Amino acid sequence: MKKSIMVFLILFYIIIPAQVLAKKEIPILVYHFIDEYKGIGSKELYVTPESFEEQVRYLRDQGYTLLTFEQWEDIHKVEKPIFITFDDGYKNNLNAYEIYQKLQTPYFKPRGTIFVISDFIGWANRLSEEEMKMLSDSGLISIQSHTATHPDLTKLEVLENELADSKAKIQAITKKPVIALAYPYGNFNSKIVEETKKYYKFGLTTTPTLYKETGLKDELYLLPRIYVKYSTTLDEFAGLLKK
Ligand SMILES: [Zn+2]
């Protein structure tokens, strides 16, 4: 009797979590500006600091674990993993960092990944080298690559400058490995995936779905991401996580 219970328990712990894990769908969100919209540029690329704070607070309340790509293996260890990413390296991403600091508790470490365009570092509206280093050293923000000049990679013959040089430049600033690339405009093809593999462990698209592990070749270079927009309400935000 006892033996059969033991066998049952062993099978339960081996088989059931494997099934649960196989079905796990992971949101990878993408933001651009974390700022008030002041009438310049595309409004939907903005999320106000108030909305962003409300969204991160919601993730905290709902028991999500915010991860960066260095922690990829943790998707199997935590119950509700999520990745927050920011494209283009805008200076106003410092607002997100401030909100992270404010919402941090001993039990909740808000993390995120900023994909910077390496040739734009230090421009008036972009993060400076010092800011990148400070964010990276905080342990809350990982700085990764969004290429050197933000071209449509599918239109380029030679990709080395965009992929290798941007990685080297960012690593020289943060002194940490750059392992992830966000494709500009989310555009990619098989040649770009092959080139990206030479320098990075992850490639991020803007295919708007949740990530679900399939075991298929190249899936880590085709990671989907869901946009959070200016008009996204908290209810809609909650819906995006389960889409
Ligand atoms: Zn971009």
Image (spheres, rainbow, N blue to C red):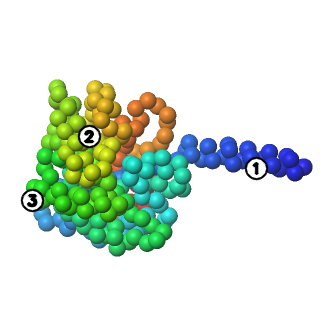
The secondary element bearing badge 3 is classed as loop
State the image coordinates of residue 54 (x, y, percent, origin top left).
36, 69
Residue in view at x 14 percent, y 42 percent: 149
Q: Is residue 157 above or below residue 139?
A: above
Q: Which residue is denoted by mark 3 in the rendering?
A: 124
Q: Does any atom of ligand 1 lie closer than 8 Å to the CB of label 3?
A: no
Tell us which disc is closer to us: 2 or 3: 3
State the image coordinates of residue 142 (x, y, percent, origin top left).
32, 54
Label 1 close to label 3 by CB (< 8 Å): no
C-alpha gap between disc 2 and disc 1:
45 Å
Residue in view at x 18 percent, y 60 percent: 130
Residue in view at x 24 percent, y 58 percent: 133
Q: Which residue is denoted by mark 2 in the rendering?
A: 183
Camera-nearest residue between 95 and 201? 201
Label 2 close to label 3 by CB (< 8 Å): no
* Residue type marked 3: Ala
Residue in view at x 42 percent, y 65 percent: 109
Q: Which mark is residue 9?
A: 1
Q: Mark 1: few, some, or many residues within 10 Å (few <14, many ≥20)? A: few
- Decide which of tag 1 and tag 3 comes sooner along the chain: 1
Q: Which mark is residue 28?
A: none
Give the side of residue 140 with respect to residue 108, left or right.
Answer: left
* Residue type marked 1: Leu
* Residue type marked 2: Tyr
Quick one: which residue is furthest to the right in this view? 1
State the image coordinates of residue 191 (x, y, percent, origin top left).
28, 26
- Decide which of tag 2 and tag 1 comes sooner along the chain: 1
C-alpha gap between disc 1 and disc 3:
60 Å
